[in-house]
Image (tube, rainbow, N blue to C red):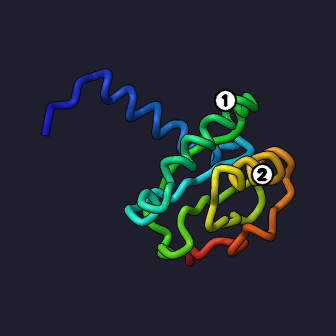
Amino acid sequence: MPKLKPEDLEQISERMRKMVVLREGAARAKIIVHMGTCGIAAGARKIMAAVLALMEEKDAKDVIVTSSGCAGLCSREPMITVELKGEAPVKYVDVTEDKTRQIFDEHVMGGKILAKYALAIGSERVS
């Protein structure tokens, strides 16, 4: 493993800071692109590229984009989860680039859940 340089630590620090911004209240939304092996095989990289392009196109500075591993529903990949501040997360399945644009425009920017693409609303976490 190569040695870490100070600039590597700065990049890691910046990445981690962005990940916790939503909890601190600076961002109003978070988009998680599920990029486990199954997600990548199903096209998650294209979905991530589409989300990043939409972020730039819409100048959405109050939205965090991150990735996660497999969500356990390999047959429904690619998947994204949208979390709006103060609301339950929504997991979207069988996502395409076109569906990604619709989800971004209507849910992330407009606050309207697209039930036709959603698998679940809420979190599977146990407190």
Q: Residues within 10 Å of mark 1 (few under 14, many from 20)?
A: few
Q: Quadrant of the N terminus?
A: top left
**Position in image of residue 125 (x %, y %):** 56, 74
Q: Residues within 10 Å of mark 2 (few under 14, many from 20)?
A: some
Element on which disc 2 rests: helix
Nearest to viewer (mark 2 / mark 1): 2
Element on which disc 1 rests: helix
Using the image, tell me which numbered label, if any, was put on residue 16.
none
Q: Nearer the viewer, residue 123 or 100?
A: 100
- Determine the image quadrant of residue 120: bottom right
Residue under numbered circle 2: 102
Residue under numbered circle 1: 56
Write the residue at 23% across / 24% down: 5
Residue type for callout 1? Glu
**Up/down of 59 relative to 124, above or below:** above
**Position in image of residue 104 (x %, y %):** 74, 48
Q: Nearer the viewer, residue 6 or 78?
A: 78
**Up/down of 75 relative to 3, above or below:** below
